[in-house]
Amino acid sequence: MVWLFFILIVLLFLGWILVTPLEICINSIENDYHVKWKGIGEASIIVMPMDLLVRLKIAFWKKDWSVMKFRFKKDKKQDKEAAEKPKKTKRNIWKNLRLFRRILGSFSVKKMRVNIDTQNYILNGYLFPLFFHVTRYYHGKPQLIINYKGKTEINVLMRNRLINIFYAIIK
């Protein structure tokens, strides 16, 4: 009876993990870049003047890493091992791209605002009608804007569930 209760608790926990929403946010206006798994944890990138911090929070545990510290640190032992490794065989790129596309298609975009200036007036002129028609076709859901002021802003919010990602991989 105790084992049955224990198995039921484990199954409920696994079911909860499968249906808990996963959120990816890219907001260049407020410098907010994070991946949040509601109720479980969050990984975010904090932009500082001369550094990037990667902050990982899982339940009550929190840890910060500096990206620049890892970038300038070299290990001579790893360089020797990398030189000695034989080259890998060529993978099927098209199969991997199809899998990536299916996984990306399982995400639902809740908010999308892209405001760009390419610094090229001709390219901006070509992109303007394209962005206008895409925005009009989807009834203003993705806000794709071309400006001529030199501003580039991206604000994207995507959500998914782990069960949808597994289904996309299996499919």
Image: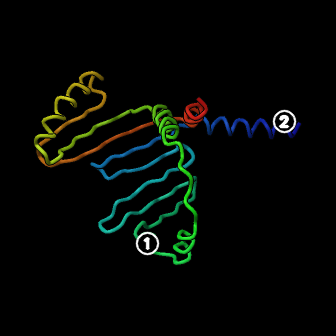
- Residue 170, horizontal then vertical, whole percent: 61, 32
Q: Nearer the viewer, residue 69 or 40?
A: 69
Which residue does the image show at 79% across and 38% down from the upper left?
7
The residue carrying pointer 2 sits among few (fewer than 14), some (14 to 19) or many (20 or more) residues within 10 Å by Cα, namely few
Q: Of marks 2 and 1, which one's residue comes earlier in the chain?
A: 2
For the image, the number of numbered tags is: 2
Mark 1 highlights which residue? 69
Q: Where's residue 43, x and y in %? A: 48, 53
User: Could you classify mark 1 by the number of other residues whose Cα lies within 10 Å: few (under 14), some (14-19), or many (20 or more)?
Assistant: few
Q: Is residue 81 above or below residue 157?
A: below
Q: Measure the alpha-carbon separation of dots 2 and 1.
A: 49 Å
Residue at the farthest right position: 1
Depth order, front residue of 99/39: 99
Foreground pick, 119 / 43: 119
**2 or 1: mark nearer the eye:** 1
C-beta proximity under 8 Å, tags 2 and 1? no
Q: Tell me the kind of residue under disc 2.
A: Leu
- Does residue 43 lie above or below 156 as drawn? below
SS label for mark 1? helix
Q: Residue at x 47, y 75 (%)?
A: 74
User: Does 88 sit above or below residue 2?
Assistant: below
Q: Is residue 75 left or right of residue 30?
A: right
Q: Which mark is residue 4?
A: 2
Q: What amino acid type should be assigned to the residue bearing mark 1?
A: Lys
Horizontal side of residue 82 vs 142, given as left or right: right
User: What's the residue at 40%, 44% (across, down)?
Assistant: 25
Q: Assign the C terminus to one quadrant of the image.
A: top right
Q: Which mark is residue 80?
A: none
Residue at image position (89%, 36%) is 1
Quarter of the image holding residue 127? top left
Q: Position of residue 104 (x, y in %)?
A: 46, 36
